[in-house]
Amino acid sequence: MERIGIIGGSGLYKLEGIKKKKEISLKTPFGKPSAPYVIAELEGREIVFLPRHDKNHTILPSGINYRANIFGMKKLNVGWIISVSACGSLREELKPLDFVIPLQFVDRTNQARKYTFFDKGIVVHIGFAHPICEGLARKLEKAAKRVKVNVHFGGTYLNMEGPQFSTLAESNLYRSWGMDIIGMTNLPEARLAKEAEICYATLAAVTDYDCWHPSTATVTAQMVIANLLKNVDNAKKIIKEVIPLIEEERNCKCKETLKNSIVTPKKFIPKRKKEELKILLKKYL
């Protein structure tokens, strides 16, 4: 049975109430993940937990080794990833302490981050029109409603570079584009999870109104963390509630994203590359 992966963001560095089995430090072809993976049991299912910024929050958003993190999840037989993240709101109705489950992303990073496993010796073009697994997202929405928190389904997450927060001009520009929330981490994860054929969904905790709103003309890290910590308990409740809702066997299209996406003919893919990426390519090569 595939495991359920949980990626924790700012404020969520560990999960209480789980039956911890072991910690695993992995090596990947892409370097070292953010932290050791915690293998545990929650609501009768095996989960894999990873704090993306390290448990002591020592890694900034552009410094996260996204490829290693997601490759490690795949190596540990993860079929679903729930990504818990802080975000700013670009809409009046998305209030601090609410949760948002977005379905779309817009990229405003500088591309220094590595967004693909297939950058040398093999060319792969996946479809990314629908970056989120809607089935998993719907289960998150259902779980959030069960624990009676304010949750908004759908919308677009703008992935900024950071680590600085937006200028006022940028914040107003993103609002004019129709963006809903803003964060620094989830788009690289979503891209790589799609390449790894893992179902992926974001549980975004609204911490502030960015800087466009009169009530928060200046966003500070202290403000973000203070509000996020208030929502951490609710995030944990949602995670605990959603685990039993996740089926034991996947039946969505996420599990075959690479089908018909590998452009390089098999005979021209270097042997070393085939071996490095065997965990991703074995069904097709």
Image (cartoon, rainbow, N blue to C red):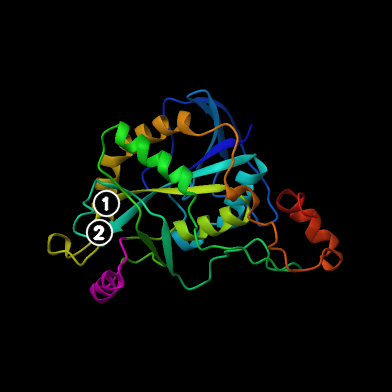
Residue under the point 52% across and 44% down: 81
User: Is residue 26 in view?
Assistant: yes
* Magenta region, main secondary structure: helix
Q: Is residue 90 left or right of residue 192?
A: left
Nearer to the camera, 50 or 150: 150
Q: Quadrant of the C terminus?
A: bottom right
Residue that badge 1 annotates? 207
Disc 2 + disc 1, Cβ < 8 Å = no
Image-quadrant location for residue 170: bottom left
Residue kind at label 1, given as amino acid type: Thr
2 vs 1, front mark? 1
- Where in the figure is residue 266, as x and y percent of width and height? 83, 63
Q: Secondary structure at mark 2?
A: loop
Q: Secondary structure at mark 1?
A: strand
Residue under the point 51% across and 60% down: 188
Magenta-span inclusion, residue 31: no
Label 2 CA crowd tier, 10 Å (few <14, some 14–19, many 20+): some
The residue range painted magenta reads 166-180
Q: Is residue 265 left or right of residue 197?
A: right
Task: Give the label on residue 220, or none.
Answer: 2
